[in-house]
Image (cartoon, rainbow, N blue to C red):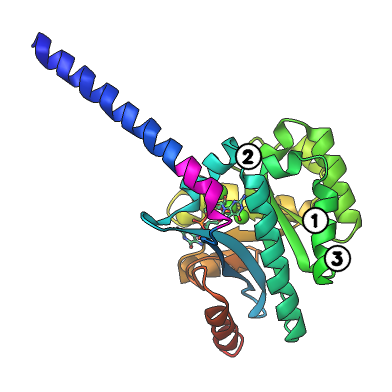
């Protein structure tokens, strides 16, 4: 029994060791991924379920690793935030998303582009000027860009975040609170935040009709948005029942697999054509 215990211990050490090694490899690969053009963006439609208009897209980052294949953002973004490579990667995402938004504009499409902004990016002193510079470079009107920030962005330095987001808002950029309800949202600070938009996190939408608590949370966020004059969008809508419920409850904006998964530009165009004519 004693030797068994030791074996188990050695196995444990070996697997932790391996996990650390893998993480280091991934971090190293992450640092080269930009230069080697291994990233691309996909776009998930945000729709008005009532008028059946496509309002815009959320740009979502994809990493195609040369050996390991597709690595989901939930795996590599936390790592990129730790080693700060998210700053350069995030810059690339903004640039590429704004380029695409400008292309849609040139095609006569009235679409807004939503881009995820990491708390690490928001903490950068020059972030406001960086974003305004990218808009100028693509000659993109600021109202075409929406930044999605999570509640963690406000936790470390609320005044700093409010200051930067106010400047961005004053320039005409829209700001959405992503994953709303999962963090430390407090009504006191929500009132102070220069935001336009709340995104109900998909964890509350998943069991919307089966779980009474989730129904109540979604209802509360919808009502909160109405009383604070904030737009509310539901994320992770997967079924017709969920969509019908939300529309009846007064939340007409949605994003989710029921409408479309994140897709490339060609598929996005095809989605607009079918969604808006049915
Ligand atoms: P998020 O910002 O909350 O993005 C929404 C996620 O939900 C996306 O996952 C999307 O594909 C997924 N989703 C949308 N509709 C549905 C649905 O109906 N059902 C289900 N099950 N999932 C749905 P994805 O693309 O894997 O991204 C995961 C997270 O990675 C994002 O969550 C965001 O936090 C982060 N991320 C992705 N791209 C970027 C980026 O460019 N910059 C930063 N900082 N973070 C990013
Ligand atoms: Ca998001
Ligand atoms: Ca979200
Ligand atoms: Ca998330």
Q: Residue furthest left?
A: 1
Q: State the image quarter where residue 68 is shown.
A: bottom left
Residue sitting at 90 percent across and 58 percent down? 171
Decide if ligand 1 comes within 8 Å of the CB at mark 3.
Answer: no
Residue 79 placed where, x, y %? 52, 40
Q: What residue sits right under mark 2 in the picture?
A: 84
Residue sitting at 67 percent across and 46 percent down? 87
- Badge 3: residue crowd in 10 Å (few <14, some 14–19, many ≥20): few
In the rendered image, residue 31 lying in the magenta stretch gets the answer: yes
Q: Magenta stretch?
A: 26-35
Query: Which label was assigned to residue 131?
Result: 1
Residue sitting at 45 percent across and 68 percent down? 239
Q: What residue sits right under mark 3 in the picture?
A: 136
203 lies left or right of 269? left
Q: State the image quarter where residue 99 is shown.
A: bottom right
> Quick check: can you spot residue 230?
yes
96 lies left or right of 128? left
Q: Secondary structure at mark 1?
A: helix
Cα distance in 3D space between marks 2 and 1: 18 Å
Q: Residue furthest top?
A: 2
Residue 44 placed where, x, y %? 57, 68
79 lies left or right of 25? right
């Amino acid at each position: 029994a004693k030797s068994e215990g030791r074996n188990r211990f050695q196995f444990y050490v070996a697997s932790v060791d391996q996990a650390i090694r893998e993480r280091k490899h991934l971090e190293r690969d992450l640092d080269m991924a930009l230069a080697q053009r291994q990233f691309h963006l996909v776009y998930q439609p945000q729709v008005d379920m009532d008028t059946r208009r496509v309002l815009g897209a959320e740009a979502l980052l994809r990493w195609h690793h040369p050996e390991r294949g597709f690595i989901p953002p939930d795996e590599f973004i936390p790592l990129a935030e730790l080693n700060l490579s998210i700053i350069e990667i995030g810059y690339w995402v903004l640039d590429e998303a704004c380029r695409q938004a400008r292309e849609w504009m040139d095609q006569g499409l009235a679409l807004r582009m939503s881009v995820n902004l990491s708390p690490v990016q928001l903490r950068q002193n020059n972030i406001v000027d960086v974003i305004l510079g990218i808009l100028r470079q693509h000659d993109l009107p600021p109202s075409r860009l929406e930044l999605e920030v999570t509640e963690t962005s406000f936790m470390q330095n609320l005044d700093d975040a409010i200051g930067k987001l106010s400047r961005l808002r004053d320039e005409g950029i829209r700001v959405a609170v992503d994953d709303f309800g999962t963090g430390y949202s407090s009504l006191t600070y929500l009132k102070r935040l220069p935001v336009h938009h709340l995104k109900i996190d998909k964890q509350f939408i998943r069991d919307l009709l089966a779980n009474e608590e989730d129904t109540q949370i979604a209802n509360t966020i919808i009502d909160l948005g109405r009383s604070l004059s904030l737009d509310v969008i539901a994320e992770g809508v997967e079924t017709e029942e969920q969509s019908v419920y939300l529309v009846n409850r007064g939340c007409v904006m949605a994003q989710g697999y029921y409408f479309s998964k994140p897709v490339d530009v060609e598929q996005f165009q095809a989605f607009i054509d079918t969604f808006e004519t049915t």
